[in-house]
Amino acid sequence: MLQFESVTKTYPDGTKAVTDLDLVIPSDGITVLVGPSGCGKTTILRMINRMIEPTSGRILWDDEPIKSIRRTTLRRQMGYVIQNGGLFPHKTVLENIGTVPDLLGWDDHKTLLRSRQLLEQVGLEARLGHRFPAQLSGGQQQRVGVARALAADPVLLLMDEPFSAVDPIVRAELRALVKTLQRELNKTIVIITHDMEEAIDMGDQIAVLRPGGILAQFGTPEEILDDPADEFVANFVGKERGYRSLAFAETPKPRLGPVRTVRNAASAFQGTDDRTQPVLVVDATGHPEGWADAERPGRVMALGETFQWPGAPLRDLVEAALTSPVGRAVAVDATGRYLGVLTSAEVMAQVQNHRADLAAHQREREEAAERAEAEREAAEREAAEQAEEEREAVERAEAEPAEPGARLKRGFRARPEASPEPGAAAKPEASLEPGVPAAEAESSPEPGVQAEPEAPAAAKPVRRPAEDGEV
């Protein structure tokens, strides 16, 4: 787990790249940092592996401040993937993958085996291992970059916009690759991007950042799509957030309806004058191929998208209904065989139910937040009233006249007695012997007065020995 505690990064010219960031990145998942240019995404990533030090605050990795870990030790536990792969042009693919194991002192045979294993794991052919980076496509270079980052089996993988320099098809393949690797290897991955679609597709958690490195919202993709924190987040997510959020909405299994099926499109409307009802063309194994064209007998129209039943998210149902030329969403099983259909109206009813549930949940969250705020304000008022009562009690106690001896009871030291004036007789001191009154205590005689001698002590009687016969 990575934890940012009030982290701020200010450059010498006064530019604040990151401002008072409090963020917890959980382990064993994919966390995406997303935001516009200048929001501090790359700065945050570089502070994690200490390429940049924060101005204030601290970063902890599994409760240990990363500042207490040597940079070399820290970085060898982290893989780093940058744009365009960042490969060494003078090294072969296998040599690039084995860079970190070489630095760690692995023997050549172990490094070679690890490099070949990763080459296969990222979906590249073994014959490409002896090529140089210039002889690879952009997507292949990026796969080698991912393999190199994983070579020493790091705990944490940092990825700085790794898919920005490739085309959309390759980008989708690389996204799928990274998600598969995360599931197989159980790594903690932090990715930064400016593409919200990419963040939603890849992230288990998403941190949306404002310019200046201010955290706007942190949550799951579904939470950010359904309940953006403010207008900035809503605008950054875009107008399609309602449709995107359907990808996380489970379908409550409505009953599928039937539709007429044929294997030969030419026979779809034979023997009937009613051509308003759609007819689905399937092959011999029951896999749907398309819709019979009522206007052109024997022709087949495009099928549109299908959705797997059960288990498909609501977005797949909407996509299937939107792309169908006859307004029917076709359901298939895990093998792709036809199961039934839903009409566009039935699909939209599912969407309406989903939005109503979201609205109810949002009301519950708002009411819970209002109750928590009211409880907090009540606790603050009670604490303030108690503090005021204590202050008034102290003021009353200080205003009341002190009782005799109260100052001594409160721990104040008694004033020393004043020195006697010259020529004045000294007061007799109290007796130091216990149980003797002060009046009987021995005192010095006054000048010129003869002290009376003390009376001699009475002599003790002497017992004589007893005579014989005396008792």
Image (spheres, rainbow, N blue to C red):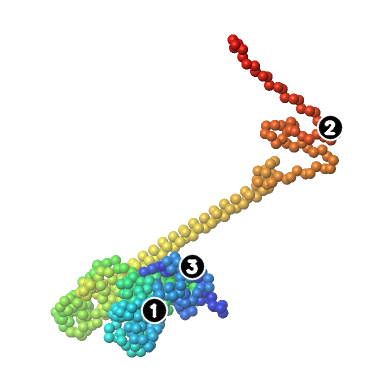
Horizontal side, residue 41 vs residue 454: left or right: left
* Image x and y of residue 451, in percent: 81, 30
Q: Please name the residue shown 73% across and 36% down the image.
A: 430
Q: Please name the residue shown 24% across and 80% down the image.
A: 303
Select label 2 or label 1 by which is in front: 2
What secondary structure is found at the residue carrying circle 2?
Answer: loop
Q: CA distance from mark 2 to mark 1?
A: 108 Å
Q: CA distance from mark 3 to mark 1?
A: 32 Å
Residue labelled with disc 3 = 5
Q: Please name the residue shown 40% across and 81% down the image.
A: 82
Horizontal side, residue 438 vs residue 350: left or right: right
221 or 305, which is in the foreground?
221
User: Residue 195 is drawn in which quadrant?
Assistant: bottom left
Q: Which mark is residue 449?
A: 2
Earlier residue among tags 2 and 1: 1
Q: Please name the residue shown 41% across and 79% down the image.
A: 160
Earlier residue among tags 3 and 1: 3
Select label 3 or label 1 by which is in front: 1
Q: How many marks?
A: 3
Q: Which mark is residue 103?
A: 1
346 or 285, which is in the foreground?
285
Q: Residues within 10 Å of mark 1 (few under 14, many from 20)?
A: few
* Image x and y of residue 341, in percent: 24, 73
What secondary structure is found at the residue carrying circle 1?
Answer: helix
